[in-house]
Image (spheres, rainbow, N blue to C red):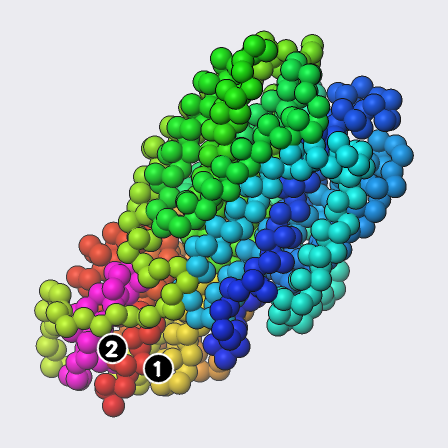
Amino acid sequence: MPSAGDTRTPERTSEAGAPRGNPFGARFVAPLYLGASLNPVNSSIIATALVAIAAALHIPVGDTAILISSLYLTSALAQPAAGRLAEEFGPRRIFVAGITLVLVAGIVGSLAHSLTALIVARVLIGAGTSAGYPAAMLLIRRRAEQAGHAAPPREVLGGLSITGAATVAVGPAIGGLLIGGAGWRAAFWINIPVAAVALFLALAGLARDPDPVRFGSPRALASRIDLLGMLGFGGSLTALMIFLDALPRLDWPALAAALVLAAALAGWELRAAQPFLDVRLLVANGALTRTYLRNGLTLMGTYVILYGLTQWLEVARGLSAYQAGLMLMPMGVLTALAARVVSRRAAVRWPLIACAVLLLVGAMATLFVGSGTPIAAVICVTAVFGLTSGAGTVANQTVLYQEAPAAALGTASGLLRTFGYIGSIASAAITGTAFHRGVSDSGLHSIAWVLVAISALVLVMTVLDRQLARADRHHTNQPPAGARNPGPAPSTEPTRAEPTRTEPTRTELPRTESRSADMTTGTHTTPTPALDPARTALLLMDFQPVVLGAVPDPQGVLARAGEALAWARTHGAHVVFVRVALADKDAAAVPAHNKTFSQAVAAGYLTDGTAATAVHESLKAEEDDLTVRKTRISAFASDTDLPAELRARNVDTLVLAGLTTSGVVLTTLRQAADEDYRLFLLADATADPDPEVHRVLMEKVFPHQAEIISTADLAALSTAAQ
């Protein structure tokens, strides 16, 4: 994922460019849904063609498994890469390019006469279809921002999930119908008309990307998209897939290569200015990381049934591909219904718990399925997995949209699919291991026991995830998705405020009122002394790529810092940029017992003179601004001359914004309070890797020393002083 060192704010446009009428009408969503469905339908439609392909090419059925793993491996690599490219070059461009590649792949597969040619076609399909989902997520976010919505309507995101989840389940039925009537090549040529329609709809219904393509030098481009990070991720994932495909034989060299490459990748990404896989974010944002794991495990269970049961029905029960596909139709229908129901709910915790319970129930029911089981009972078992797939896909996507940083939504969405594909490839390995001596009832029961273990793990993870409950409480109190953002809500009943000191040496200013709704974003209501910009300094602290990458929504907090900077420029307030960076002599002076900075020295990520430690380039400094370099956490650290500079400018009021809440903001605010500065804290231009720590500080600690406001309050506060 890109860190906040990326200066692009993806798809943010002014209200003047907002679409007229219904911004999420059929003209907009139709190409997105169709494009996003291409990958899952190609993932599942091949299931009923494998036996026919093996017979036509005169190869063992087991050899055709590479047609599954090749698409999954390609997709696992290409999904986050396509998301990153969509962030960099524009989602519409990448969306259209991906569909065009699918069109080409359909032609290649239709004309293929060898397994090698089919593998090439599947790789092209994987690469092309991978652009659909992450680009669609970015396009939806862009449209919501253009329309002035706080979030897109739930039905829009739900529709994206429904098309993906439903096509996975109905793919075998569609494949069985097509292959039964037109032969196995239908699994490839079906992409030609579908991609052609999707391409036409995209060109006609999706607005052009507003930003021009910016390539720069090859070296600069490789740095911006973190090409080395992509290659390292691809190498590690490829080695892991080789290990999984070899099961039950243990390919130790492949596993060792996967672990070594993963370690090297983590080390590289910790140093990269704009990492493709933001390791710090994954560590800091536990809710996002758990969503990836939960989604991957859930889809692993679903795909084990999708592939394992399909093979069992054809071999052990003697059904045709068409009949096996029809058996899975109820699964597809219930997937779509469950996805639609969950998409209408703001809460996600209980749907995810229900999903895990259903997965466990389905796994246990599979233990009792055998050659003598009535077909109706088998259909009922598959229906349970349909409910699981629909509910889990939508709920996990909702959590992703809530937790992923706005600037990295494309890459984050791709990674969600990547974890799903890892689960899918693992499911193929599980099926291959269970059936390696032949497709039988005992093999199906072995799969079921693995499913029991997977579902139990998912259930425990979900029940113990307290962040899901906190997120539900927060989002159920927000405006409905799709509603226009109303901004701060007025209140006529001020809450208890700290008494304001009267100091003879300071000018008494008129008082105004800051009105808001949420302490974590500067939205409490309290009588607030107005600002005199001439005696006020705006401190923008640690807005550096190395720090921005560690907090949720780095691009959002950076944008609000930019709004505060624009306010200071307009009203004549002093501007102070504070950054943390260590020169060689500073690093040498850090004692080993200083846990924070000794680790920073060892990792080398606070080295002065690097792009990672510079003030983010979107916050442009001017000649009269003050820039302070510090070697410890507080902006008032003993090695800075900030106190003297503020006194020289006759500043008695500070407006603070910075990263992180528990770091520079906490230490600077407490020290500035002891120095008797009047303090204002911009809560919406402040963030912390731990949202709960941010909330507690904003609600329980900071109000005793500072007025908690938002950037939207600044204009009114400064006007009241005039």
How far apart are the two marked residues, 2 and 1, measured between alpha carbons?
12 Å
Q: Which residue is mark 1?
A: 573
Residue 203 screen position, x and y as percent: 69, 65
* Position of the C terminus by quadrant: bottom left
Mark 1 neighbour density, 10 Å: few (under 14) some (14–19) many (20 or more): many
x, y percent for residue 698: 25, 58
Residue at 70% from the left image edge and 32% from the top image edge: 176
Above or below for 217 versus 569: above
Question: Is 515 a magenta residue?
Answer: yes
Q: Is residue 359 visible?
A: yes
Q: Is residue 545 left or right of residue 104?
A: left
Q: Residue furthest bottom?
A: 722
Q: Which label belongs to residue 200?
A: none
Q: Residues within 10 Å of mark 2 (few under 14, many from 20)?
A: some
Query: Toward which corner of the image does residue 478 lie, by quadrant?
Result: bottom left
Q: Is residue 433 left or right of residue 342?
A: right
Q: Specify the amino acid type for callout 1.
A: Ala
Q: Which residue is mark 2?
A: 652
Q: Which is more N-terminal, label 1 or label 2?
A: 1
Residue numbers of the magenta segment: 506-531
Q: Position of residue 327 (x, y in %)?
A: 59, 27
Residue 615 can be seen in this image: no
Position in image of residue 201 (x %, y %): 67, 62
Q: In this picture, is 443 found above or below 451? A: above
Q: Nearer the viewer, mark 2 or mark 1?
A: 1
Q: Nearer the viewer, residue 362 or 612?
A: 362
Q: Nearer the viewer, residue 431 or 308?
A: 308
Query: Quarter-wise, where is residue 568 in the image?
Result: bottom left
